[in-house]
Image (cartoon, helix red, strand yellow):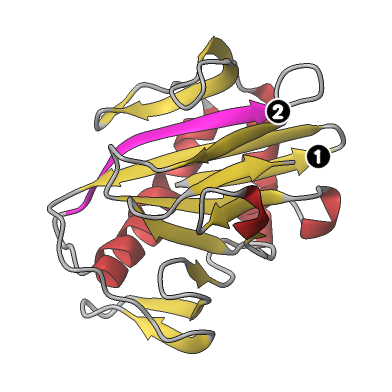
Amino acid sequence: FFFWLAFSAHTYMLLLAVSGLVPPLRSLPLLSRHAYSSSSGAAFPESTSEDGTVHVLHGLVSPGSLAALREAAREAMFESEGDTVDGSATYLAPLIESGRVVGRGPLTRLAQPVLEERVLPYVRERTGCGGAVVCDALVRRYLPGERLGLSAHFDVSAFATAVLPLSPPGEYAGGFYVQSEAHASSRRFVPLGEGDLCMHQYDVMHGVDV
C-alpha cells in the first residue's frame, strides 16, 4: 500500500504490498457506499467502490497521525536505485522487505501500527483472504529534477496494494491513477481525501503522475 506525502515541491509515497492465497475477487457495485465492519468486530469508516476493482476507505487515518507521518518522512533517508517498472532512477526508503522490518527510525515506528491495526485487517476482509500478510512497504519520493511519476503497470508480485495520501488534496496535483486500457486516454485519477485509503488487487493497471 502507498502513503502519499506531498508538501511544497516534494511528494512522497509509502507502498505496501500484500501477499496471500488468491481467492475469487469480490467487488462492490458501481459508486456504492457503505459502513464497513469486519467479521471479527473491527469497525471501519465508510467505503466506496467506483468500478468494482478499486476500493476507497474514507477517513482511515486521523489528521494527527497523518501529520506525524509527514514529519517523519521529511527526515527519512532515501536510497536511489533502478525502478522495477521502467528501470529509471527511483528514490525510496524501505520499511519492510519480504515480510521483514528493515526500516529503522520514526517513520517505520509510526507506520507499523497503521499497517497492522488498520490497513491489513481491512485488506483481509475486503478481499476475503484471511491469510494475507504484509510483504513489502517503502516510501517513494517524487521531486522535480528526480522523478515525477510512474508509468502504468500491474503489481504482478503482490496480491493487493493500497494507497494512502498523507497531505491534504489541495497540496498536490494529480496523484494515483488507474488505467483500464493501453492508451493513456483511459487513465483516471482516483480522488482521495485526507486520511482516505485506496486499495486494489494485482489485476488493476495503475501508475503515478504528480
Mark 1 Cα within 10 Å, few/some/many (few <14, many 20+)? Answer: some
Percent across and percent down for residue 17 are 35, 42
The answer to whether residue 192 is above or below residue 13 is below
Q: Are marks 1 and 2 in contact (CB under 8 Å)?
A: yes
- Horizontal placement of 185 versus 31: left or right? right
Is residue 133 covered in magenta? yes
One can see residue 72 in this view: no
Q: Looking at the figure, which quarter contains the C terminus?
A: top right
Is 141 in the magenta?
yes
Q: Residues within 10 Å of mark 2 (few under 14, many from 20)?
A: few
Q: Nearer the viewer, residue 153 or 134?
A: 153
Residue at 34% over, 54% down: 203
Q: Is residue 178 visible?
A: yes
- The amino acid type of the residue labelled 1 equals Phe
Residue sitting at 55 percent across and 55 percent down? 178
User: In this picture, is 163 found above or below 192?
Assistant: above
Please name the residue that numbered disc 2 is placed on. 74
* Mark 2 residue element: helix
Would residue 131 appear left or right of 192 to someone viewing this image?
left
Q: Nearer the viewer, residue 195 or 72?
A: 195
Q: CA distance from mark 1 to mark 2?
A: 10 Å
Residue beneath disc 1: 7
Instruction: Provide the residue span drawn in magenta.
Output: 132-142
Query: Mark 2 belongs to which amino acid?
Result: Arg
